[in-house]
């Protein structure tokens, strides 16, 4: 048994896609699912999405705005490996969600629009990946369009993202004259046919760049290719496993997600090179994926995922060992053992009851209000995984009800939605106000929309004089009492009943810090 568990863990490849909106993340995700045989024909993901979303008003908002706000998990087998792809929201107002999802992966696929190059969101997401030196594979997309000079693109990645590039495939032509890619490691030419993007296409492969067939297939482009390759090989880096795993070098593939070309070459190498589940840091020690005992942490919570069930699901990354249905798990923060027999998995968003899961997998736990982002589960050991941030919100609104009788439903809705981590609800100690904090302004719209759709309450927002929030930490109750006396009007409880300081101005915050040196004011809730 132990042996099988180890083998299963070694097969896992858990990753997310990082990209700037419109670079092609959705399109390439769909093609990956096609290669993973989760779908039979591309185009069906959008179709499924559309019909599913119609059942939820909240998704309706997402559709109107043209953004994707959910994180789902997709698992499929490929070349003897089990791939877990964690989807992330593209819109920057949901970046917190994306950051936390990146804490749950072992590698990332960076998709770049080759007509544009490195864009802002990619830069930010790369910074997040760098915090844990996450290995990155790069896909240069949209080769069926007129793109920028590929050598210039590599230079830009190296300069701006500070990571070495090792081209693995190289494009032959671009736009209307895009002919395919040359595989530098195999010395093979893969020929592109347009218009076959919705299926897995049979590709013609020519062995060897000096093969006479190459000349016949590529004509004048072959000489251009040879010239370019000389330049590229002189200027770029060779693939090196150690450098890749340290996050210092990225293998680069070219292709078109829309045309489903170049994707399989990338995926083949991805599953071969990307790391199996990596060790994870806790407050006390590093936990290795191959340890016998189960452990994991919650990196995301989502309320009302399925409008028919009206439940809240916590997404847990298994960090070591394996889960079996009915096992007992220790909830470290609550110091409580729980028997878990109804965990779920998410195969392409479809929820299924889960029998077994291994380190690297993501499982869903039903949340009845006792789970928080960052919570650790073990088989008894008092561990706490670190590095899962909950940022202080930067934008605040007072929430008022249209119908004052629904205050209970409003509180419940705000508290449940703030479990997801994107918004925070604050209840001032000295008033009956409800103050909502968010990191992106779009979050306010989403919350109003979801309150109406999921909790049947209509609310309006009013401006409120809060500049920033800090979680308050102090072991001395007397000092907390003093703080309450002197600055009670600025104190509030968050959704999880943690004491927070809502500062009307930054100057006020600094003054309060000076007056109360014994109190800590935390910018993130991870402490
Ligand atoms: P996301 O915002 O990163 O998820 O991007 P999408 O996958 O939704 O793609 C944005 C737009 O670019 C859509 O209109 C896609 O059809 C288009 N697109 C994606 N990949 C390609 C490609 O390889 N070639 C071309 N020409 N268009 C693409």
Image (cartoon, rainbow, N blue to C red):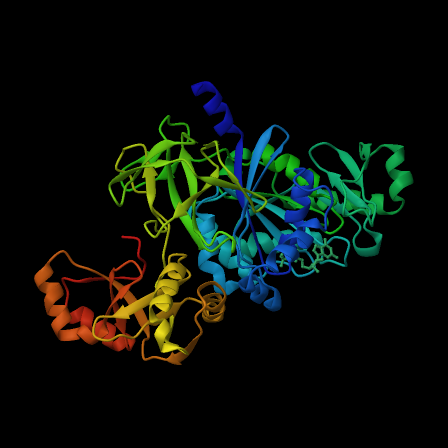
Q: Which of the pair 127/412 is nearer the observer?
A: 412
Tell which quarter ligand 1 is in. Answer: bottom right
Q: In this view, does 484 lie above or below 402?
A: above
Does 169 sit left or right of 315 as displayed?
Answer: right
Position of residue 76 measured from the top left corner of the image (x, y, whole percent): 60, 37
Q: Is residue 339 above or below residue 444?
A: above
Position of residue 496 measured from the top left corner of the image (x, y, whole percent): 29, 58
Position of residue 350 measured from the top left corner of the image (x, y, whole percent): 57, 45
Does 158 sit left or right of 130 as displayed?
Answer: right
Res 234 visible: no
Number of numbered callouts drawn: 0
Does 38 sit left or right of 144 as displayed?
Answer: left
- The N terminus sits in image quarter: top left
Query: In the orientation shown, which residue stands out farthest toward the right?
Result: 216
Res 169 visible: yes
Residue that appears at 47% across and 49% down: 102
Q: Which of the pair 366/235 is nearer the observer?
A: 366
Q: In this view, does 90 lie above or below 286?
A: below
Position of residue 255 measured from the top left corner of the image (x, y, whole percent): 72, 47
Residue that appears at 87% across and 43% down: 218
Query: In the orientation shown, which residue stands out farthest toward the front?
Result: 405
């Amino acid at each position: 048994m132990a042996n099988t568990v180890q083998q299963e863990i070694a097969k896992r490849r858990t990753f997310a896609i990082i990209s700037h909106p419109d670079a092609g993340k959705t399109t390439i995700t769909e093609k990956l699912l096609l290669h993973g045989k989760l779908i039979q024909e591309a185009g069906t993901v959008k179709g499924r999405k559309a019909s599913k979303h119609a059942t939820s008003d909240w998704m309706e908002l997402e559709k109107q705005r043209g953004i994707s706000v959910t994180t789902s998990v997709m698992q499929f087998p490929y070349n003897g490996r089990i791939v877990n792809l964690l989807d992330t929201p593209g819109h920057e107002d949901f970046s917190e969600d994306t950051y936390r999802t990146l804490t749950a992966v072992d590698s990332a696929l960076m998709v770049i629009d080759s007509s544009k190059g490195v864009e802002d969101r990619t830069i930010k997401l790369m910074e997040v990946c760098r915090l844990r030196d996450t290995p990155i594979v790069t896909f240069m997309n949209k080769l069926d369009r007129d793109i920028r000079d590929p050598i210039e693109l590599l230079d830009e990645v190296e300069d701006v993202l500070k990571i070495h590039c090792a081209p693995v495939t190289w494009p032959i032509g671009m736009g209307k004259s895009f002919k395919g890619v040359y595989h530098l490691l195999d010395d093979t030419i893969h020929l592109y046919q347009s218009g076959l993007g919705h299926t897995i296409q049979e590709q013609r492969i020519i062995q060897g760049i000096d093969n006479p067939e190459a000349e016949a297939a590529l004509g004048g482009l072959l000489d251009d290719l040879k010239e370019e390759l000389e330049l590229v090989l002189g200027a770029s880096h060779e693939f090196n496993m150690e450098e890749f795993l340290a996050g210092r070098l990225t293998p680069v593939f070219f292709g078109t997600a829309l045309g489903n070309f170049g994707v399989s070459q990338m995926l083949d190498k991805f599953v071969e090179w990307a790391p199996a589940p990596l060790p994870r840091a806790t407050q006390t020690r590093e936990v290795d994926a191959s340890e016998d005992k189960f452990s994991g942490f919650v990196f995301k919570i989502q309320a009302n995922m399925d409008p028919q069930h009206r439940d809240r699901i916590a997404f847990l990354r298994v960090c070591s060992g394996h889960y079996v249905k009915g096992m007992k798990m220790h909830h470290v923060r609550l110091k409580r053992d729980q028997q878990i027999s109804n965990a779920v998995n998410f195969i392409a968003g479809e929820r299924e009851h889960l029998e077994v899961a291994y380190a690297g997998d993501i499982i869903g736990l039903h949340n009845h209000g006792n789970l928080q982002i960052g919570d650790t589960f073990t088989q008894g050991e008092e561990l706490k995984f670190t590095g899962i941030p909950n940022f202080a919100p930067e934008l605040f609104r007072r929430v008022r009800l249209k119908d004052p009788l629904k205050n209970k439903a409003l509180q419940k809705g705000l508290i449940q939605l703030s479990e997801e981590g994107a918004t925070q609800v604050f209840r001032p100690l000295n008033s009956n106000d409800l103050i909502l904090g968010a990191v992106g302004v779009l979050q306010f719209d989403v919350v109003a929309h979801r309150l109406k759709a999921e909790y049947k309450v209509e609310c309006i927002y009013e401006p409120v004089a809060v500049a920033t929030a800090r979680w308050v930490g102090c072991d001395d109750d007397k000092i907390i009492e003093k703080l309450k006396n002197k600055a009670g009007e600025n104190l509030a409880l968050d959704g999880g009943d943690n004491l927070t300081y809502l500062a009307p101005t930054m100057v006020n915050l600094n003054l309060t810090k000076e007056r109360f040196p014994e109190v800590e004011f935390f910018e993130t809730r991870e402490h």
